[in-house]
Structure formats: structure tokens, C-alpha cells
């Protein structure tokens, strides 16, 4: 065999390998990213991760060219060209088998069926390499377009449909497979040669480049609706509401924490009103924000079911009221799982931006593919913050917030701006120096650890290992300190520009976080203090500084407080009150925790919990018959249930809780199951596993 012949053979193999793998990259990217944008525009607010995409195309091209050249040396040329496709299917099979094993260990059988399917594809594409009658019959399975589509699309469809739990969904997947196979056979008939030319390699490369450029140009846009031309009242103040997602008050130095996590807010508190006993109405983002926006408790607004109910479009929300009074309204939210138009929380905002950060490892897709496999592998190893951070960090939210303020300054209308910061929410990855600001960080801790801990501690009832607790607390506190530093930047900017002089500013959180407290890890699980006691600072122009207020207050108070401080009227029939008015010392506020349907298997969470809270006492009742009374003044960590020794307090607080329960029962169920929403929530740890 002459040298030229070998070189030509290797070149033909390299071309075939390169083209096959670029085809795979094109099919994968189109299915995982572009189809999601087209099919679910309200859900998918995740821009393309350009770096990872370019790296993958380079990697695929290189692997393809090398493996094709080697195959051409070892096999007869025609077989080698076809074997390039089998190599892709082999790699995909490994990813599928791994996904199936992973699912199996968690008691889910979902991926197994698809693993069996892809193994079948591998066997057929291996037989199709051979030059015998059976091989020729199965030849379409060695076509890279068809094989790549069969390897990626059914898994993606099955995933969109909530896997193949139902027979109907299984039918759809089978139909899709049948269509692809039919196209493959049709295509094979017209195919003249199996060899790829230099021209096809160039053409495919051009398609790949085009897709990447399209991904760069197309980035999900914030919702921008036209405002109503209503004249605002003269000198109406602006309103800024800042929600620090997942921040419990007792981890802030402002509230007495021994680590100085909030020096900026301590300084800001000097000319604002601090509420010492502020509670979120719910224990996770959706009900809590919905209560802040409507001024009523979750039992009444109904947006409290995990993975389910959205805030009704009929609800009257703060942004809507302000917009109708001539305000410009904008929201920039880092929490892209719940603060979405899909959950009804975008109502009334002219500008609503809750895009995700393009993360290389958090892809939401879960559908087995090489890209997912690599992302999953990166995710299991301590990796770079830029690569893994899945939500927009405090710096970005602050910068975008200041950009919006610039936009507002060009208008002659007052504005309402909502900023939601997410850094204290898991997975917590504060930047340096905040990452190492407090001791305890475990450098080996992987991103997946939070989900594992949630499973073990909250669902299986195991204790939180000390090394994990120290790590999580160090990152949690570091994240709070990081947000505090960014708030100082924002407040400094507001002061400098003079905007603060005519702006009502409220800073709060939507819920806390259990870090092993009461046997829980994460939030959305109970109404114990660590999950619902949140900060609240209020600065109103013209209202002088007051001593910290210890009467209990709630997220439902924000709507009437902000509206009336701006000289506007609040709607009738709210659960909340204007906090600037004198509140009775005997005031009771409420908080609720609803079960997560995806975790009903975890018996301890299969109940609704409600709390009635006064300045000193807190009664917790659950639909499972639990009745706990705590003396918050003498037992702030809720360690001693004194229900038996204080029956009079139980009797006094119970009727209010019963009323709330009645209100919840009167709510029509709006629950809908939506696999895409479930997937997004899962990626943020809301619904791990089954
Ligand atoms: Zn939240």
C-alpha cells in the first residue's frame, strides 16, 4: 500500500469522523437549546452558554477526525466510514446507561427504558457497519443524521412530557421514533455515497458556526409591556423593594449575629426603621412573593403549591396598582425558577427580567446527551464559579438595577423597582473574598452536595454532618456579606444621585433557610423561625428614624405600607396593615408551609403547617395533629414545646389558624403539572428526585 493511499484513506476517515461528530453537535444543540426557546418561550429564560458550546464543537470535531482516521487504518474504508456513527452512539449509550443507573439508585425507573432503547440503536448501528445482507438492511442506522436524532430527540421529548410515566406519553415517544426511522430509511435510498467530502465538512462547520452566532444574537428578552398613560400624583415618591432571597434574620449582624455579615445594612439602619420580628407569609419564594405583592396570606391567594399553582391573573398586585397610578414598574429578579410570568409574579411590571445565568453545568435538560454528561461530570467536581453559577449574582443584579434607575431618570414619572438577589440560595458560590471570609469552607465540597444533604437530612431524617454544616454556614454567611456589600454600592449610588431623597426603600427576604435546624436542610419545609423570620428595613422620606419595632410584622404588610406611604390608597380586605401606623401590642401574624407533592414520600413533610405568631408566643399546628407552642422571648430557637403548660395561649391563637385553614379550603385548586417548571425547580433544589 503506497503512502499516498494510506494518507487518502486516513483523510477520508478523518473527514467522515469530523462530519459525523459535527452533525451530532448540531442535532444536540438544536434539540436541547433552540427547540426549548421556540417551544417554551415563557419558561426558558436561559441564554446559551457560548464558551461551553464552542468548546464542545471543537472537542467533537477533534475526536471525530482522530477516531475516523484511526478507524480508517484498522478497518476496510467503507466499514470505517460507517463505524464513525457507531462510535457516537457508543458514547451516548454510556451516558444513557449512567443516567439509568443514577435514576435506579434513587428508585426511579424512568431512564431505564430509554437506556434499553439506545442500546438497541447501538447494536443496530454496529451490525450496519458490516457488508452482509443484514448489514445492508440496517444501513440507515449508520447514517449520522438519523442515528444522532434517534439518540437525542426521543430522550428530550420523553423528558418534556415528564418521562414515560404514562402510556400516552410512551405512545408519543414511540411515534417520534417511528417518524425518525421512516425518514432515515427514505434518506438512505437516495444516498449515493457514504464518504464525506471536504465540501460537506466545510458546509457542516458553517452550520455549526451559524448556530453559535444565532445563540449569541438571540438571548431571551425581558418582558416589556406598554405602560398606561395615567398622570401620577404630584411629587409621588419612587418605591424600591429589595428582596434578599433565602436570608434568615438571625444570620445578619444587624439582627445580632456574632459574625459581622451586614455592616452596610447596619449603617443603613441608622436612618431607617428596623422591624425586629418580621415574618415571611410562606416558606418559599412563590407564596411569599405573592403575599408581598397582594397583601394577603397564601391560604387566600392560593399560589402556594410547589410545582403547581400560579398567582391568579385576577389578583390585584402592587405593581399593577402602581402602574395604574402612573408609575413606571420594573423587576430584575435573580430567582428565575419562581419569579416568572409563568407563576403570575410578572403581573403589573412593564419591564420584567428574570433571566437565568448561562451556566455550563446547570443545563435543566436532564435529558441524556454528551453535553449533559460532561456538564454532570463538571458539576460533581469542585469547579470554577464562572462555570457553575446558575443564577445572576449580586453584582449583576446591582448593575442591572442601576441601569434601570438610569432609564427611569429619563422619564418624568415615579417608578417602582423590584430587585431580587439570590446569592444566599443554594447552590451558594459567593465570590472571593467572601468565599473564604468565614472559616469552615470545605474545598472538596461539590455542587451536588446540597441536594444530597437535603435528601438525607430533610427527607430521610439523618443528622447533618458537622463538616457539611460548617461549610454551608461559611458560604451562607459569606453570601449574605457579599449581598450586603453590593447593597452598599446600590444605596451609595441612590444617595449620590439624590434619588434616595424621594424614594421609599424596603429591604426584606422571602424566607429563611434551615441548616440542620429542627432536622431540616434547605427551606420550603416548615414554619420554624429559621425558615420564616426575615429581615425588614424600611426607609420612608420625611419619616424620622424610629427605635427598632418588636411588634410582629409580615410580608403581607408591605403592600399597604408602601402604597399608603406613597400617598395612595390600599385595596380593601387585606390581611396586612400599614406599618407606619401604630400597631397593637397584641398583634398576631401568620405563616404557612404547604407540602411538596413531589416529596410526599417523605412522611414528615406530608402535611400543611401553620403558625400564629405574637411578640412572645408562637403556636404551630399541622394537619397531622401537631400542636406546638413556643415562648419566643425565652426560647428563641423553639426547643421547648410548652403547649401543655399554657393551654390558654393555645386556645387564644387557635381560632385564627382555623380561619386560615377554612380560607385555604375555599380556594379553587389551580394546580397544574408542568414538567418544564418541575425541571427548573429541581435544578434549584426545590424538587430533588421523585
Ligand atoms: Zn426564595
Image: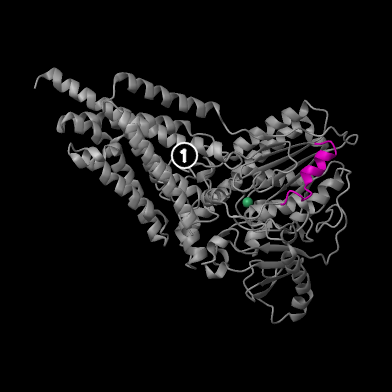
In the rendering, at what x and y percent does residue 258 appear?
Answer: 61, 55
Residue placed most toward the observer, 401 or 524 = 524
The picture quadrant where one finds residue 607 is bottom right
The picture quadrant where one finds residue 198 is top left
The residue where tag 1 is placed is: 32
Q: What's the coloring here?
A: one colour
Q: Is residue 318 magenta?
A: yes
Mark 1 Cα-neighbour bin, 10 Å: few <14, some 14–19, many ≥20 = many
In the rendering, at what x and y percent does residue 18 appear?
Answer: 30, 28
Q: Is residue 76 magenta?
A: no
The extreme right residue here reads 234
The picture quadrant where one finds residue 61 is top left
As displayed, is residue 486 above or below residue 641?
A: above
As displayed, is residue 65 above or below residue 543?
A: above
Q: Which residues are magenta?
A: 312-327
In the rendering, at what x and y percent does residue 17 appear?
Answer: 28, 30
Q: Is residue 129 visible?
A: yes
Amino acid at each position: 500500500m503506497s503512502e499516498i493511499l494510506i494518507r487518502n484513506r486516513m483523510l477520508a476517515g478523518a473527514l467522515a469522523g469530523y462530519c459525523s461528530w459535527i452533525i451530532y453537535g448540531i442535532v444536540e444543540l438544536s434539540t436541547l437549546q433552540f427547540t426549548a426557546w421556540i417551544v417554551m418561550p415563557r419558561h426558558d429564560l436561559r441564554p446559551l452558554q457560548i464558551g461551553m458550546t464552542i468548546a464542545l464543537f471543537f472537542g467533537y470535531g477533534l475526536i471525530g477526525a482522530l477516531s475516523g482516521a484511526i478507524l480508517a487504518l484498522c478497518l476496510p474504508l467503507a466499514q470505517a466510514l460507517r463505524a464513525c456513527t457507531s462510535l457516537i452512539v457508543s458514547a451516548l449509550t454510556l451516558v444513557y446507561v449512567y443516567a439509568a443507573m443514577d435514576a435506579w439508585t434513587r428508585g426511579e425507573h424512568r431512564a431505564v427504558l430509554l437506556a434499553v432503547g439506545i442500546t438497541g440503536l447501538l447494536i443496530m448501528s454496529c451490525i450496519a457497519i458490516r457488508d452482509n445482507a443484514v448489514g445492508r438492511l440496517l444501513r440507515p442506522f449508520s447514517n449520522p443524521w438519523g442515528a444522532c436524532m434517534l439518540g437525542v430527540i426521543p430522550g428530550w421529548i420523553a423528558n418534556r412530557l415528564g418521562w414515560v410515566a404514562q402510556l400516552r406519553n410512551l405512545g408519543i415517544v414511540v411515534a417520534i421514533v417511528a417518524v425518525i426511522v421512516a425518514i432515515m430509511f427514505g434518506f438512505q435510498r437516495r444516498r449515493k455515497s457514504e464518504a464525506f467530502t471536504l465540501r460537506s465538512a466545510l458546509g457542516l462547520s458553517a452550520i455549526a458556526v451559524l448556530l453559535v452566532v444565532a445563540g449569541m444574537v438571540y438571548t431571551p428578552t425581558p418582558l416589556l409591556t406598554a405602560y398606561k398613560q395615567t398622570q401620577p400624583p404630584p411629587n409621588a415618591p419612587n418605591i424600591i423593594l429589595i428582596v434578599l432571597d433565602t436570608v434568615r434574620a438571625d444570620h445578619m449582624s444587624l439582627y445580632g449575629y456574632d459574625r459581622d455579615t451586614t455592616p452596610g445594612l447596619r449603617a443603613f439602619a441608622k436612618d431607617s426603621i428596623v422591624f425586629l420580628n418580621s415574618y415571611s407569609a410562606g416558606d418559599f419564594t412563590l407564596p411569599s412573593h405573592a403575599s408581598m405583592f397582594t397583601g394577603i396570606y397564601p391560604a387566600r391567594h392560593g399560589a402556594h403549591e410547589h410545582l403547581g399553582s400560579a398567582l391568579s391573573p385576577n389578583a390585584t398586585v402592587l405593581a399593577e396598582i402602581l402602574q395604574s397610578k402612573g408609575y413606571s414598574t420594573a423587576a430584575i429578579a435573580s430567582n428565575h425558577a419562581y419569579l416568572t410570568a409563568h407563576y403570575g409574579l410578572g403581573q403589573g411590571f412593564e419591564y420584567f427580567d428574570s433571566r437565568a445565568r448561562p451556566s455550563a453545568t446547570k443545563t435543566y435538560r436532564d435529558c441524556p446527551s454528551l453535553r449533559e454528561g460532561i456538564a454532570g461530570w463538571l458539576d460533581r467536581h469542585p469547579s470554577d464559579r464562572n462555570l457553575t453559577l446558575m443564577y445572576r449574582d449580586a453584582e449583576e443584579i446591582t448593575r442591572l438595577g442601576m441601569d434601570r434607575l438610569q432609564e427611569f431618570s429619563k422619564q418624568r414619572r415615579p417608578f417602582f423597582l423590584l430587585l431580587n438577589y439570590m446569592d444566599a440560595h443554594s447552590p451558594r458560590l459567593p465570590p472571593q473574598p467572601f468565599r473564604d471570609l468565614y472559616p469552615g469552607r470545605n474545598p472538596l465540597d461539590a455542587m451536588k452536595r446540597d441536594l444530597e444533604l437535603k435528601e438525607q437530612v430533610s427527607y430521610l431524617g439523618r443528622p447533618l454532618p458537622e463538616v457539611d454544616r460548617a461549610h454551608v454556614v461559611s458560604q451562607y454567611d459569606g453570601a449574605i456579606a457579599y449581598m450586603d456589600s453590593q447593597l452598599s454600592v446600590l444605596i451609595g449610588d441612590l444617595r449620590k444621585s439624590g434619588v434616595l431623597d424621594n424614594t421609599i426603600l424596603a429591604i426584606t427576604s422571602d424566607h429563611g433557610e434551615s441548616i440542620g435546624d429542627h432536622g431540616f436542610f434547605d427551606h420550603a419545609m416548615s414554619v420554624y423561625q429559621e425558615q420564616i423570620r426575615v429581615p425588614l428595613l424600611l426607609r420612608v422620606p420625611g419619616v424620622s428614624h424610629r427605635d427598632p419595632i418588636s411588634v410582629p410584622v409580615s410580608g403581607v404588610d408591605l403592600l399597604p405600607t408602601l402604597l399608603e406611604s406613597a400617598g395612595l390608597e390600599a385595596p380593601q380586605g387585606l390581611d396586612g396593615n400599614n406599618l407606619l401606623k401604630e400597631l397593637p401590642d397584641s398583634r398576631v401574624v401568620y405563616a404557612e408551609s404547604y407540602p411538596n407533592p413531589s416529596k410526599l414520600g417523605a412522611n414528615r413533610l406530608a402535611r400543611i403547617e401553620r403558625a400564629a405568631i405574637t411578640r412572645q408566643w408562637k403556636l404551630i399546628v399541622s394537619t397531622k395533629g401537631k400542636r406546638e407552642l413556643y415562648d419566643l422571648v425565652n426560647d428563641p430557637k423553639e426547643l421547648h414545646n410548652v403547649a401543655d403548660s399554657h393551654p390558654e395561649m393555645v386556645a387564644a391563637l387557635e381560632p385564627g389558624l382555623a380561619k386560615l385553614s377554612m380560607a385555604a379550603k375555599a380556594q379553587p385548586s389551580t394546580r397544574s403539572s408542568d414538567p418544564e417548571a418541575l425541571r427548573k425547580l429541581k435544578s434549584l433544589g426545590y424538587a430533588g428526585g421523585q
